Amino acid sequence: MRPAVDPEPAASQMRHYVAEFVERVNARARLPLDYSVGSLRVVDLVVDGLRRGGAGGAGARPLEALFGFGAYAGEVLVRKAGAVWVELDRDQREVFGQPLGVRMPDGRLWNPLGKVLKRFDHGAEESVALLYLQIHGRRRRSDPAYLGGGEGSPRRAS
């Protein structure tokens, strides 16, 4: 597997990598990439455009752009669902086909980088926006950590 970006960022570098990617994309296209869950729909639309445009020739994948949008989707999961970036071991790389993934608070691994590639390869049946809704183990809005209270903060009564 050829790396999409060289050098591939480490898990600890992903927040910075994504911030730079968003800055470059916004300088060119002014896309509403604001790290909201709703902005994942923008990712779907942009990937669809890349797919239709045949970026780089018939059937060619624009790997750096797809990696960037996958990294952005992962960063949305980090910021909104409590995930953390992790470097995958050899077996996990075999399964996911990617060097990095996100681990949810419940311990499950998800593959936003691969999800964007699937969207490019298969179209609308692979929605990046719907990935967020399918994820098990998201922090709930009532979770104090989600609200910024951190551990030990009292839960508000519903």
Image (cartoon, grey):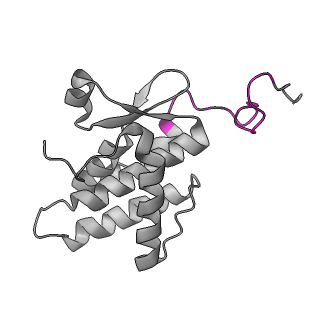
Residue 13, picture quadrant:
top left
* Residue 20 percent location from the top left of the image: 44, 61
Q: Position of residue 27 (x, y in %)?
A: 45, 77
Residue 75 drawn above or below residue 57: above
Instruction: Based on the picture, tell me whether residue 149 belongs to the magenta stretch.
Output: yes
Q: Nearer the viewer, residue 39 or 83?
A: 83
Image coordinates of residue 42 in percent, x first then y, are 46, 63
Position of the N terminus, as image quadrant, is top left
Judge by depth and name the residue closer to the eye, 152 or 77: 152
- The reply to whether residue 44 is in sight is yes
Residue 69 belongs to the span the image colors magenta:
no
* Relative to 135, 80 lies left or right: right
Q: Residue at x 41, y 62 (%)?
A: 21
Q: Which residues are magenta?
A: 134-152
**Residue found at the far left of this picture:** 58
In which quadrant of the rendered image does the C terminus lie? top right
Residue drawn at x 57%, y 61% is: 34
Provide residue 140's location: percent of width, then percent of height: 68, 32
Give the left or right position of residue 45, taking residue 114 as reference: right
Confirm whether residue 130 shows in the render: no
User: Could you tell me which residue is drawn at 37 percent across and 50 percent down?
Assistant: 70
- Does 28 sit above or below residue 61? below
Question: Which residue is rendered at x = 27% and y = 37% of the image?
Answer: 99
Left or right: residue 91 compared with residue 37? left
